[in-house]
Amino acid sequence: MLFYLLFFVFILYYAYQLKRRLKLPPGPVPFHLLGNLPQLGFYVWNEGSLPKALQKFHEHHGDIFTIWMGPLPTVHIASMELAHELMVKQGNNFADRWAPLLFRYVNKGLGISMSNGNYWQEQRRFALQTLRNFGLGRNLIEERIMLEFDLQCSELEERRQSMNDDVVDIKKFFELMIANIMNRLLFSERFTKDSEEEFFVLKNKFEETMENLGFLDIYVNEWMLKAPFMKSRYDKLLQPVEEQSDFIHGKILERLEAIRQGEHVITDEGTDFVDAYLKKIDDEKDNPHTSFTQESLNMTLLDLWAAGQETTTTVLLWAFIYFLHNSEVYQEASQEIQKVTQRSRALSLKDRTETPYFNATITEVLRQASIVTMNSFRLPKTDCTIGTYTIGSDVPITAQISLIMSDERYFGRTEQFRPERFSEDKKLEPRVIPFGIGKRACPGESLARAELYLIIGNILNKFEVEASGDCPIIDSTNRSGIVRKPEDYNVKLIPRYVLA
């Protein structure tokens, strides 16, 4: 009797899943309970990376396809036209983010990255406006970036003269530079020689989490987080995030204590993001429905601090790997920059119109690096129809950026590093969307673009860049990770000349 009952339940479940499948875009046939995880795992192993595995599904099933992550169907868009139609033209319906349980476990639905609804709108609007007030889109942000660039270069020069050594741990160089730019925006301070070690301990632990966090971890269920054999893994995996959160919370408490002691006074808009947010909390203290609380501040700062460092640093590391492998691109970009600066001044954001080849080179770096291997999912507010397919409001959907930016129909020879492709076809650049598309696009895009232009450009302007030892390979260190990271490497930064 029990056997027949279980068999009947199985048939009902199978019929229900089959009915769902018929409404969804095509995809590989899912296994019972496991979905397409076996096929996905095989392709990741066989092809060498998650983006290449997704490319196989794209080739077999078209511009929109379904992958079942266990019992959960997920829809993936590999066409710029479809992505624009859904995420931009129907942007309001796709403004909510599907937040994996693991992320909700950490941020409790607060902050910017994984929140939704009116709360998310208020937090994002405030963050964008505040960052603009502190320089994004104005000359002030260039001053902030170049101040840190010059300080780091001065330290390099001191080291070079004292040790007669041009070899640089480029990863540490970039990590500290980007961290200090973010710290000045958020806390009005930078890591000093005495506090650098604290930063690198936090950073290395967080990096370990990112390396160990696989795309399958995004789909864990609640029972997995509580099961004894899984709980210990996830507790260890998330510990560095908790430590970063504690670090940020400590900075907030320091500021509050300084205000209480009269050592710090918030005037006008404040001097940094923390000031502006604390002022907003005070302005809304009588609003019982306010979304601006110290807990929200902590999580928003964590989102900005972690994301603003990890992504930009990773792109910078990929940029110089591509330069080391493509000497003709490196030479042409360097010569263009030096022609503009006459080797007598630093490169400025005002020079962008005079550096078309270098601009194209940065775009090609962003396209080739494509550092996010599995893009975050949206959750439609209402059921939507795409052609003959019906996607329910409970089905996560994403524009798979790595596929859009490697579409052979438009880019051709996508594996080749060719900045000139963007001068040959002016319609290509809008198809490079590394910061996302629609209402959930990265709020720090303008800062990141300014950092990339000024840091890469001024290194090419000021230094000869050479490999130190073997040239780093153009491959990710983690096949199944959610961030495509290069191997660690050193370079020689040999001064071309001394700027006045």
Image (spheres, rainbow, N blue to C red):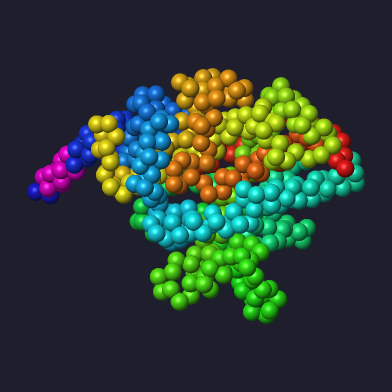
> Can you say which quadrant of the picture contains the C terminus?
top right
Magenta span: predominant SS is helix
**Residue shown at 70%/76% (left/top)?**
263
**Residue shown at 61%/74% (left/top)?**
256
- Can residue 492 be spotted in the picture? no
- Can residue 482 be spotted in the picture? yes
- Quadrant in the rendering for residue 302: bottom right
Vertical placement of 220 versus 246: above or below?
Answer: above
Q: Total marks drawn? A: 0
Q: Is residue 243 magenta?
A: no
Q: Position of residue 313 (x, y in %)?
A: 64, 44
Closer to us: 281 or 18: 281
Q: Position of residue 70 (x, y in %)?
A: 33, 42
Vertical placement of 11 versus 64: above or below?
Answer: below
**Residue shown at 45%/76% (left/top)?**
286
Which residue is at the far left?
1
Please provide the residue range marked out in magenta: 3-15
**Residue shown at 65%/76% (left/top)?**
259
Q: Position of residue 386 (x, y in %)?
A: 29, 34
> Seen in the image, is 284 located left or right of residue 319?
left
> Seen in the image, is 171 located left or right of residue 6?
right
- Quadrant in the rendering for residue 492: top right
Q: Position of residue 345 (x, y in %)?
A: 82, 39
